[in-house]
Image (cartoon, rainbow, N blue to C red):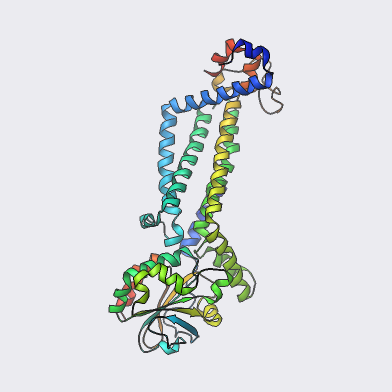
Amino acid sequence: MIAVGAVAVLFIVASSSGGPSINAGSPAPNRSFTIDAGPLQQANSVASLSGKPFLLWLVTTWCSSCQAGTQAMAQNIHAFASDGVRVVELEVANDFGQSGPDILSFGQQMAGPSFSDSDWSWGTASAKLTSTYDPQSDLDIYYLINSSGHIVYANSSPASTMAQLLQEASTM
Amino acid sequence: MTTVAERQLAPESILAGKQAGAIWRDLLVRILADRSSRFVFIASAVVAGFVYSLLLPFAYTQRFSIANWQYLDARYIFFTVAFALGIAWLVTLQVFAVRSIGRGSTGKDTARRSGPLGGLAAAASLLPSLLCCSPIVPTLVGILPVSVATRLHTTGRVTYFFATKENLILASALVVLAASGLWSLRRLARSACLASQCCVPGTAAGESGDSHEPATLASTIAKTGPAQEKESIS
């Protein structure tokens, strides 16, 4: 009974806790990153992306939900494109100190042909960006940022929240 | 099963071992022949299989949803079936024990002693799904008064462990579950007062070396001889 209770508590915590720590409506803090592949190779910071809405998505390359989220994104990347939203998928700094595939191998494997989509860029977050946007070290977290650089929606695990994310993207 | 010649030549321990095997087989046949036990087994397997099929791929979607089935690969299907059968067997044994020997304390002891181990195995099997990629570990680590760098590293280490050792954890939990099932079966087979048919006057306690345990079926049969063996285990 104790074991079952412990699992139930874990399940409830898993379903209800965590998530983004920067609230919607706040200006997106300007932090740096590097882009390794995709159309935004000139961009190097959050501020450099302003002018058009974009999705800032932080992942670790060894987590299951990040893999599933990337596959889900590959199926929906055209919907984001039609809403004028660019996707920037960044590996958290140093993959939280663990060994995983690099972001390019990860992207090619999980996104398939969509890896080269003209609205999807791949890169690596700086340590500062990681600690600012993901201070709780969630493995799979994203921010939808509008053209004026404000966060309009934030959540985690696109594989399970894709419907809400698409809904929010369609209003931008 | 055991010839007269074998009884004369073989040591008592070998005879007891053979008879214990026969008792296990007989017990299995009795459980499988019992309609209620079959129903309990099937119902438990279906429920456990359904729950496991949703919970094992939980790490991918972070949801308890039918959508998790799209992440059921051969590995998850194997573990889902194995855990469902293991848990169903454990539940069936415990229900059978309580039903068969409900009047005595042995059945309740069997259920009480095997339950935690099986529950522990079932809970451990879900840890990789619940702790990898979910906000649980970051939330718990966030409570600790440590620096951001330490927090990131600790969370990474813990979640990475569950992400990369999932197969090992699942296999270990399965072994524990199987051991728990065998332990329950053994406890049940050793129960002297099974269905109140094998209690021998004067052997109710202490014969098996366990002062809290009555004489075992095997030792009872060894003492009462082949003429009463059939009656004892029937």
Q: Is residue A38 above or below residue B207?
A: below
Q: Nearer the viewer, residue B12 or B51?
A: B12
Q: Is residue A161 left or right of residue B151?
A: left
Can residue B214 be seen in this snapshot?
yes
Please state the horizontal and vertical placement of residue A54, each as a whole percent of the image. Answer: 38, 81
> Taking B77 as reference, is B109 above or below it?
above
Which sits in the foreground, B159 or A123?
A: A123
A41 relative to B16, above or below: below
Q: Position of residue B59 (x, y in %)?
A: 46, 60
Q: Quadrant of residue B201?
A: top right
Q: Quadrant of residue B14?
A: top right
Q: Nearer the viewer, residue A27 or B55?
A: B55
Res A1 seen here: no
Tell me which residue sits at (50%, 80%) in the image.
A125
Q: Residue A149 location, x and y as percent?
A: 41, 87
Residue displayed at 38% across by 70% down: A111
Q: Is residue A97 left or right of residue A109?
A: right
Numbered disc total: 0
Residue B200, percent from left and from top = 64, 15
- At 57% from the left and 29% from the top, the residue drawn is B188
- Quadrant location, the N terminus of chain B: top right
Give me the residue at 59% from left, 30% from top.
Answer: B186
